[in-house]
Image: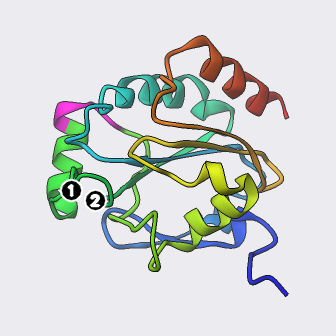
Amino acid sequence: MSDKPPSVYEIECIDLQGRPMPLKLYAGRPLIVVNTASLCGFSGHFKGLEDIWRRHRENGLLMLGVPSNDFGHQEPGNSVAVAAVCLDKFGVTFPLLQKTRVKGRDTHPLFRFLTAEGGYFSRPRWNFYKYLVGRDGHLKNWFSSLTNPGGEKFQDAVSELMKS
């Protein structure tokens, strides 16, 4: 028997300010989850992600940035430092979770769920893996760090997500 929840919306998270953020409050909304690191060479992806957030949030999209120090120690700061860098340097306004483990034995349940649904190759192998979750709470698509959120491939996938 699997301990995987029936949908992503059954998972409990903690926001960057340390407050509970039960995803069930967002049930029925499309969701994009991205593991982030502000010192990563892919941090330019913040701009494309923010653009998507601003364009689709009024239509129900929830974007979640999940800071992680798991790859290259590229998110070494505490929550205050993460928030400052993401807002001041990158202009991020979409919600951020507390710094979280996205790989290994202590992987957060959110990433255990996403990779269980996406399979072995969907496990994040670096920062800025992107997971698109449908209104039904199940993974629809995922993209590695190499996929730019401003690119046509990702933009098309987001458009499909918003239609579903």
Residue 162 higher or lower than 135, as above or below: above
Drawn side of residue 112 relative to residue 53, left or right: right
Please tell me the numbered disc located at residue 73: 1
Q: Main secondary structure of the magenta part?
A: loop
Callouts 1 and 2 close, C-beta under 8 Å? yes
Q: Amino acid at mark 2?
A: Asn
Question: Foreground residue, 32 or 18?
Answer: 32
> Would you place residue 152 above or below residue 134 in this image?
above
Q: Which residue sits furthest bottom?
A: 1
Q: Quadrant of the C terminus?
A: top right
x, y percentage for residue 128?
43, 41
Distance of label 1 from label 2 (alpha carbons): 5 Å
- Judged from the image, the secondary structure of the residue bearing numbered disc 1 is loop
Query: Counting other residues with Cα less than 10 Å from the Cα at mark 1, is it few (<14), some (14-19), or many (20 or more)?
Result: few
Vertical order, 127 against 162 (above or below): below
Judge whether residue 89 is colored magenta. Answer: yes
Q: In the rendering, at what x and y percent does residue 35 appear?
A: 43, 50
Identify which amino acid the numbered label 1 is placed on.
Answer: His
- Residue at horizontal 64 percent and vertical 17 percent from the top: 153
Left or right: 110 as drawn, with respect to 119: left
Q: Helix, strand, or loop for circle 2?
A: loop
65 in the magenta segment: no
Residue 90: x and y in percent read 25, 31
- Residue at 32% from the left image edge and 60% from the top image edge: 70
Segment tinted magenta in the rendering: 88-92
Q: For mark 2, what is the residue? A: 69
- The residue at 33%/72% (across/down) is 18
Residue 97 placement: quadrant: bottom left
Quadrant of the drawing holding the N terminus: bottom right
Relative depth, front residue between 114 and 24: 114
Residue closest to the eye, 56 or 105:
105
Residue 31 left/right relative to 164? left
